[in-house]
Image (cartoon, rainbow, N blue to C red):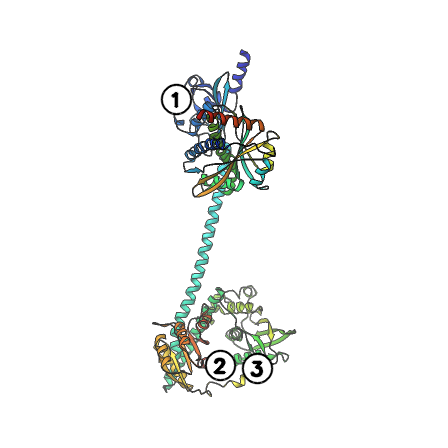
Amino acid sequence: MTDISGLYQSLYHNLDLGLIAVDRSMRIVIFNKWMCAHSGITEDYAVGKELSDIFPQIHETRLISTVRDALEHGLPAIVSSIFNRTPLPLFTNSKQTDRIHQNIHVIPVTNTNNQYCIIQISDISASIGREKALEQQVQERKIVEHELRETLHKLEEASKVKGEFLASMSHEIRTPINGIIGITRLLKNTSPTEQQSDYLEIIDNSVQLLLTVINDILDYSKLEAGKLILHETEFNLNKIIIDIINMLKPVVDEKHLSIVNNSDDNLHSSYLGDDVRLKQVLLNLLSNAIKFTDSGEIKVSTQLIESKANSSLIRIEVSDSGIGIAPEVQSRLFEKFTQADSSTTRKYGGTGLGLSISKNIIELMHGSIGVESTPDIGSTFWIELELTQKTNQSVNNSNENKKTATEVKFSGNVLLVEDIIVNQLIARSFLENIGFSVVIANNGKEALDLYQEQPFTLVFMDCQMPVMDGYEATRQIRKVETGSHTPIIALTALAMKDDAQLCYDAGMDDYVTKPYELNDLISCIQKWI
Amino acid sequence: MDKIPQMDELELDLLNEIFNLGVGNAAASLSQMVKQEIKLSVPEIDFLTTDQLITNLGQDKLLCSVSQKVSGPLIAQSIVLFPDADSLEIVRKLLGDQISDAGIAELQNEAMTEIGNIVLNACIGSLSEAFSETFIIDLPEFERATPDALIASKQLSDDSYILFIRIELMLSESKITGYLAFLIGGASFNVLQNSLRKTLDALL
C-alpha cells in the first residue's frame, strides 16, 4: 500500500502539468513539482496552506469560485485562458518575467467521504503565441489593405477633383473668350483703319487659337470623366472632308503646300454618326499634317474597305511628307500630353492632347486609329470606322435648302434673356443682323414678366442668371403659356454634366453652346421657325 | 417513448423556478467573467421526445453544443445548444471586433465550452441544491453537429425524454436564442418527478 502511494506521488510529481489538490477547507494537500518549478513556491511551503494564502491574487476570481463550487456542489469547471488571462502567477522562467497562459480544469473528487478538488493546469502559452502571431498577421494585412483602399480612394478623388477643376476652369475661360470674340467681330464692323483691322485680325486669330486649346482641355476632361456623348446625325463624309480642306486652305497656301483628296466613288452619300466629332478628329489629323510638313503635299484618301448590308467599313488616311515620327515614339503618340519629343512642343505648339482626344473619340465610335511613319520621309495617320448607311435620303438636297449666313433674313421679335452685358451686346448684334428685333431681359424674372406682356417669335435663354435662372424661367413660362408653343433656345456656356438634358427637362426646345458663331445661331433658328 | 409522462402544474412550476435560479446565477457569473452585462431570459420549460427536439431545432441546422454528463441519483446528459452561426456571434461580442473571423472560429471551441460550462453548472447546481442531492458531473465536452447526430451521440437509453428549455441570451444589443436540453431516461424521469414531489411536500 505504501509502495502504491509512493508510485502515485512519483506519478503526479512527474506530470507535465500543474497539479494542486485542496481539501474542503481549501487547504493544499498536493502541490506538484511542475507547480514548484513555475511558481517559485516549494512543496513544503505550500502544503497545508490555504490556496488564497499562497495565491492572494485569485481572491474573487472565477477560478476560486469554481473551486468553491467543486467542493460544495461537486461541479467541475473549465477555466480557459480566453476569458481568464493568467489566473495564477506562473512563469516559464525563474526570473518570473514571462507569464504562462493557462487552461485550468477544476475537478471535484470524493475520497472516503472527504471532498477534494483537483486543480489541473496546462501550459498553453505556445499555442496562444501561435494564435497571436497569426492574428497579428491578419491584422497587419488588414491595415495594409485598408491603407491601399484609402490611397486608391484618394487618387480617385484627386482625379475627380482634377477633372472637375479642368472643366470649371475651361468654362470660366470660355466665357470671357466668348466676350472677346464677339466684341472683336463687332469692332470689325465699325470701319476700323487698316492698322486697326490688322490688330483686330491678330486678336481674332489669337483668341481662336486659345479657344482651340480650351476646347481640347474640355474635351479631354469630358473623355476622362466618361461624359463625352456622341450625337448621331446623318452626314456626307466626302463633304466633311472637302469642308475641312477648304477651311485649312489659307494655311496650306501660306506654307506653299498642296492638298490632294482621293475619294472612293463607292462611298455612300449619307452615313449616320457624330459628324461634329468626326470632323474634329479629321481636322486634328490634317492640321497636324500641315503643322509638321514644310514642303511637299498632303494626301487625304478615303477608301471603302468592305460594304455590308447596312454599313460600310471605311478607311481614311492622311499622309504627309513631313518630319516623320521615330518608331519608338509612335506607340505612345496617342497617349495624352505626348508629342514626338518635347522640343516639338516648343517649335510647333499645341497641347499634345489632340491625338489622345482623337483616339478616344474614334474608340467611342468603335473604330480604330493608327500611324505609320518613317522619320524625314513622312507619316500616314489612318482611321478605320464602320459607319451605318442612311438610305433613300439625299443629303445634298437638304443642304441646298440651307442658306448661307449672309443670305438669311428673318423677321419677328426675339426675347433675349441674358445677364452679362457683353453677351447681350454680341447676341443682340447677331440677331439684329439677321433681321430680328430684340427685347432684352436681364434675368429669368424679367423674362417671365415680359413674356406675359407680349408675344415673342423665339426666346434665347441663358441658363445661369441671378434672381431666377433660365431653367426656372422656362418652367414658369411653360406654365403660363397659352396658345402656340414659343420655341425657347438655351444659350449655355456650361459644357459639362448633362447640360442638354437639364435644358430639355426644364422645357426648352434646343440649345446653343457658347461661344457661338452667327452660323450656329442661324442653323438653330432655322430648325424652329 | 411515444407518450411523455406528465408532470402536474406544481411540479412544472418548481422545476421552472429551479432553472430560473440556475439561469440567473449563470448570467451573473458570465457577466462577471466577461465584464459586460449579459442577461438570460426566464426559461420556458417543455418535455419533448427526441424526434420533437430534432424538428424543433431544425433537421439540418448546424449546432454548437456543450454537454456535461450527470450521474448519481439520476442520470442525464445536460446540453447547452446554440445555432453555430449565433455561437460565433456570441464569441465575437464577448471578445471584441478586433479579432478576425478566422480567429473567432478558432476560439469558438474553447470560449463556448466555458460559457456552456457556466450555464450548465449553474443549472445543475440549482437542481442539486433544491433536491439536497450531490451529483457526479463530468467535464464539459464541445461538439458541432446537426441535431440528430448530436442526440445519437448523447442518448443514454432508448426511452429518453428531453427536458427542453429555451433561453434567450442578451448581450450588447443582441438577442440570441439558445437551448438547454436534459436527456433523461424513463427511470431518471421518475427520480426527477419524485424529487420535485418531495421538495413540494416539504414546502407545502
Residue closest to the eye, A381 or A28:
A28
Whether residue A120 is visible here, answered yes or no, is no
Q: Chain of mark 2?
A: A
- Marker disc for residue B88: none
Q: Is residue A278 above or below residue B94?
A: below
Q: Residues within 10 Å of mark 1 (few under 14, many from 20)?
A: few
Q: Earlier in the sequence, mark 3 or mark 2?
A: 3
SS under mark 1: helix
* Mark 3 to mark 2 CA distance (whole Å): 16 Å
What's the residue at 55%, 12% (across, down)?
A3
Q: Is residue A151 above or below residue A112?
A: below
Residue closest to the eye, B53 or B190:
B190
- Marker disc for residue A53: 1
Mark 3 vs mark 2: in front: 2
Tell me residue A223's x, y (percent).
49, 66
Residue A180: which quarter of the image? bottom left
Q: Are marks 2 and 1 in contact (CB under 8 Å)?
A: no
Q: Earlier in the sequence, mark 3 or mark 1?
A: 1
Tell me residue A77's x, y (percent).
48, 28
Q: Are marks 3 and 1 in contact (CB under 8 Å)?
A: no
* Mark 3 to mark 1 CA distance (whole Å): 107 Å
Kind of residue at badge 3: Val
Q: Which residue is mark 2?
A: A527
Q: Are marks 2 and 1 on the same chain?
A: yes
Q: Residues within 10 Å of mark 2 (few under 14, many from 20)?
A: few
Tell me residue B123's x, y (percent).
48, 30
SS under mark 2: helix
Q: Earlier in the sequence, mark 2 or mark 1?
A: 1
Kind of residue at badge 1: Asp
Q: Which residue is mark 3?
A: A395
